[in-house]
Image: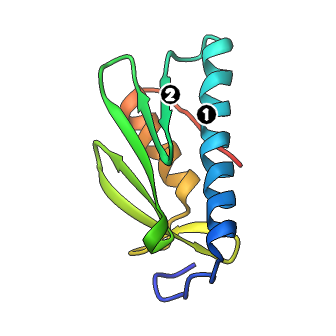
Amino acid sequence: MTPNTPSTPLTDTEYLALTRRLLDAIEAQTDSWLQADVIDIDAQRTGGLLELSFPNGSKIVVNTQPPLQEVWLAARSGGFHYRHVAGKWADTKDGTEFLAALSACASQQAGQALVFSA
């Protein structure tokens, strides 16, 4: 996926279903880590916004942007925008896949390896 690859056209219903599944998967992973005593990450969701709070006080925010059909990621390392391309959420600048970027940001902020998967 390159930044020049066009995003996959989605209906509003498809976009909402995809983003709901994405946020559900992130929440499920954080719940799993909490139950397995891997790390104490608090996940709070309000509509299309999911906030992950780490033990050191840092946060990661994942926010859906329906008018743009994007997903935004805000972390200590910066802010990133993703569009749905060829079945994946790809960074609008460099094509990085969303879950890979979320994993890298979460690992950095947690001080330990954390991998989010679909």
Residue 13: image location, x then y, percent: 68, 67
In the rendered image of this protein, does residue 55 appear above or below residue 60?
above
Report the residue at 43% width, 74% height from top: 92
Q: Residues within 10 Å of mark 1 (few under 14, many from 20)?
A: many
Residue 7: image location, x then y, percent: 56, 82
Report the residue at 38% width, 16% height from top: 55
* Secondary element at image label 2: strand
- Front residue of 8/20: it is 20
Check disc 1 and report the residue beneath it. 27
Residue 82: image location, x then y, percent: 47, 66
Left or right of residue 79: residue 20: right
Q: Quadrant of residue 56?
A: top left
In the rendered image of this protein, does residue 106 appear above or below residue 32?
below
Check disc 2 and report the residue beneath it. 43
Residue 45: image location, x then y, percent: 50, 35
Left or right of residue 78: residue 25: right
In the rendered image of this protein, does residue 3 appear above or below residue 13?
below
Q: Residues within 10 Å of mark 2 (few under 14, many from 20)?
A: some
* Secondary element at image label 1: helix
Find the distance from the CA under tag 2 to the CA under tag 1. 6 Å
Q: Are marks 2 and 1 in contact (CB under 8 Å)?
A: yes
Residue 106: numbered disc: none
Placement of the N terminus among the 4 image quadrants: bottom right
In the rendered image of this protein, does residue 30 appear above or below residue 13?
above
| Badge 2 amino acid | Ala
The answer to which of marks 2 and 1 sits earlier in the sequence is 1
| Badge 1 amino acid | Glu
